[in-house]
Amino acid sequence: MKVSFHGHSVVKIQTEGKTILFDPFISGNGLTDLQAEKEKADAIILTHGHGDHVGDTEAIAKRSNSLVVAPNELAVYLGWKGLKTHGMNIGGSYDFSFGTVKYTQAFHSSAVVTEDQQIIYMGMPSGVLFTAEGKTIYHAGDTALFSDMKLIGERHPIDLAFLPIGDNFTMGPEDAAIAAKLIGAKLVVPVHYNTFPPIRQNPQNFIDLLEDHISGKIMEVGETLEL
């Protein structure tokens, strides 16, 4: 399995001939190395409805005939736009041809803000546990620190975790370091930072706050890990 990071919270997984994109915010993302018009995916997995996570889902999914997996209200909304969707909710899991997806809780918000100044509720924000080839990846989405992260890690041993560190809208480095301890992942990677002025962070500060037994890595944009 190959796992790559592409700026903000964009993660790509390649497993058994399938390509899965998490939160493909590409257009308007000054940190990404991807080009939205060239991306193809067998599946797109979304954590919540904010524009910096839904991103280019509609265009990529229509071009690739991707399956979009999302919290239920967001899945319904995207289905109305003609996308092929599978709605889920917190605590639920489903075995897809490309791997198993389980949605976890996250403490944040979730909505689409329209051009005519309407706010459309998009269900509960979520994290995602993705399992394939005997490996489990935790994409925490946008979230604050919460104590049940410990239970998530105990119930589902995690090989690789992506944790937001940007502060302002999510956990900052200090809380994210505590989250890393709670989930007990073999490797933790910081995401959701430096894209916009309010979330400017030095990711090394997060790495330095990790306890000695916790492995952390700052992934460069476009960098790939083999699991």
Image: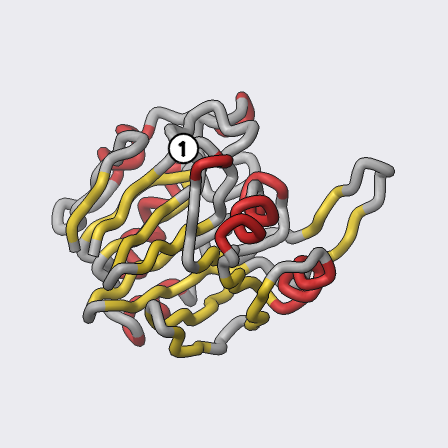
Closer to the camera, 37 or 153? Answer: 37
Closer to the camera, 164 or 115? Answer: 115
Horizontal relation, residue 179 to residue 59: left or right = left
Q: Is residue 95 above or below residue 190?
A: below
Pick the quarter of the image with the C terminus: bottom left
Looking at the rendering, which quadrant does residue 129 occupy? bottom left
Mark 1 = which residue? 34
Q: Position of residue 154 (x, y in %)?
A: 28, 72
Say which residue appears at 58% left-offset and 66% top-offset: 85
Pick the quarter of the image with the N terminus: bottom left
Q: Is residue 30 above or below residue 192?
A: above
Q: From where the camera sits, is residue 151 visible? A: no
- Under circle 1, the secondary element is loop
User: Which residue is at the far left?
Assistant: 213
Horizontal relation, residue 138 to residue 56: left or right = left
Q: Position of residue 178 (x, y in %)?
A: 33, 50
Q: From where the camera sits, is residue 63 visible? A: yes
Crowd band around label 1 with a 10 angstrom C-alpha radius: few (<14), some (14–19), many (20+)? some
Q: Is residue 171 above or below residue 137?
A: above
Say which residue appears at 27% left-offset and 30% top-offset: 220
Say which residue appears at 24% left-offset and 35% top-offset: 223
Looking at the rendered structure, the number of numbered marks drawn on it comes to: 1
Q: Position of residue 125 (x, y in %)?
A: 58, 58
